[in-house]
Image: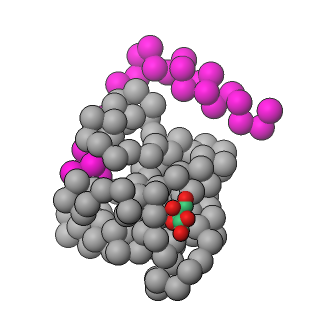
Amino acid sequence: MKIAIACDHGGLRLKNVLKADLEEHGYDVEDFGTYSDDSCDYPDYAGPAAKAVASGKCDKGVVVCGTGIGVSITANKVDGIRCALCHDVFSAKATRAHNDTNMLAMGQRVIGEGLALEILHAWLETEYEGGRHDQRIKKMMAYEGE
Ligand code: RB5
């Protein structure tokens, strides 16, 4: 599975931890930056990562900033993206099972690295349940382009 990953300066340290862990677990990771802790604008990095997921170049995406909010809002502006901001394991599992999210956002200033790794794996390893959720996702996605 190929994972797009991106961050701003506020998420660099956590992104590097997540990236190393993903690679250790055999995931193919494409890193869309940023690569330094110089101040930058999160849409410049979260946007291209989201486009890579939307186009099918990457299967899923993980984005990090200080709060996780800016990168999640950015990713959700790209058609085809359902990005969930998660800071707990329950939500990470639920959003895969119910919302079939294709991107995960987290905030480096909100949670520690250990919890972030648990959330990452819970999210990656939970399957979408389908069924009654299909029509809800269809209705949600129908707002795109309106
Ligand atoms: C950067 O200071 C900070 O605003 C950014 O990382 C993020 O938290 C925005 O939502």
Q: Quadrant of residue 31?
A: bottom left
Percent from the top left, x then y, of residue 8? 51, 71
As drawn, 112 above or below 9 = above
- At x 46% / y 20%, what residue is drawn? 133
Image spot of residue 50 (x, y percent): 56, 57
Residue at 40% x, 23% y is 130
From the image, give the main secondary structure of the stretch colored magenta: helix
Q: Visible in this render: residue 2? A: no
Q: Position of residue 145 (x, y in %)?
A: 77, 37
Q: Is residue 54 positioned above or below 63 on the image?
A: above
**Extreme residue in the front direction:** 109
Q: Quadrant of the C terminus?
A: top right
Rendered residue at 40%/55% (across/down):
106
**Span colored in magenta:** 117-146
Q: Quadrant of residue 138?
A: top right
Q: Was residue 139 drawn as part of the magenta stretch in this picture? A: yes
Write down the quadrant of residue 140 in the picture: top right
In which quadrant is the N terminus drawn? bottom left
Decide if residue 145 is in sight here: yes
Q: Position of residue 34 (x, y in %)?
A: 51, 78
Q: Is residue 96 left or right of residue 103?
A: left
| Residue farthest right in this picture | 146
Q: Inspect the magenta stretch and tell me whether residue 69 lies in it.
A: no
> Does 53 sit left or right of 144 as displayed?
left
